[in-house]
Amino acid sequence: MKKQLSILLYFACVALTSCNNITSDYTNNINYNAKIETNNENLSDLISKDSILKIAEINAKTAYNDLSIYNVKAVLKEEKWFIDYELSDPEMNGGGPHYVISAKTGEIISFRFEQ
């Protein structure tokens, strides 16, 4: 079920002329500090960082209403995106969502929520 949902979300996002219209109200305050590490992957065959961040964001909003308090980091390793939402204020307690997403299919391989 998770695989089907993540693939559906990915293709819905790609099919739209601008994915920013879906979540612009929520993403205006998110700091996307993305770092890309590669191990000779053919990047043209992989899903873009922006598309992967949208997949993670749509899923994260099921548990977190406000994502504006997080800095988002994306790291590409071995055809998997590792997405981490970290609190932007170090004095706050709690944590955010963390994802491992296939860079080939957009499938959410694993995730955990810290609260």
Image (cartoon, rainbow, N blue to C red):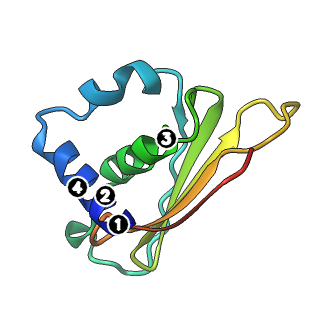
Position of residue 10 measured from the top left corner of the image (x, y, whole percent): 25, 53
| Mark 4 to mark 3 CA distance (whole Å) | 16 Å
Tell whether 114 sits left or right of 10: right
- Do residues under tags 1 and 2 come within 8 Å of each other at their CB atoms? yes
Q: Is residue 115 above or below residue 80?
A: above
Position of residue 108 measured from the top left corner of the image (x, y, whole percent): 42, 65
Residue indicated by mark 3: 62
Q: Amino acid at mark 1?
A: Met
Residue indicated by mark 4: 8
- Do residues under tags 3 and 1 come within 8 Å of each other at their CB atoms? no
- Do residues under tags 1 and 4 come within 8 Å of each other at their CB atoms? no
Residue indicated by mark 2: 5
Q: Amino acid at mark 4?
A: Leu
Q: Quadrant of residue 112?
A: bottom right
Q: Quadrant of residue 17?
A: top left
Where disc 4 sits, the SS reads helix
Q: Earlier in the sequence, mark 3 or mark 1?
A: 1
Q: How many numbered discs?
A: 4
Q: Earlier in the sequence, mark 4 or mark 3?
A: 4
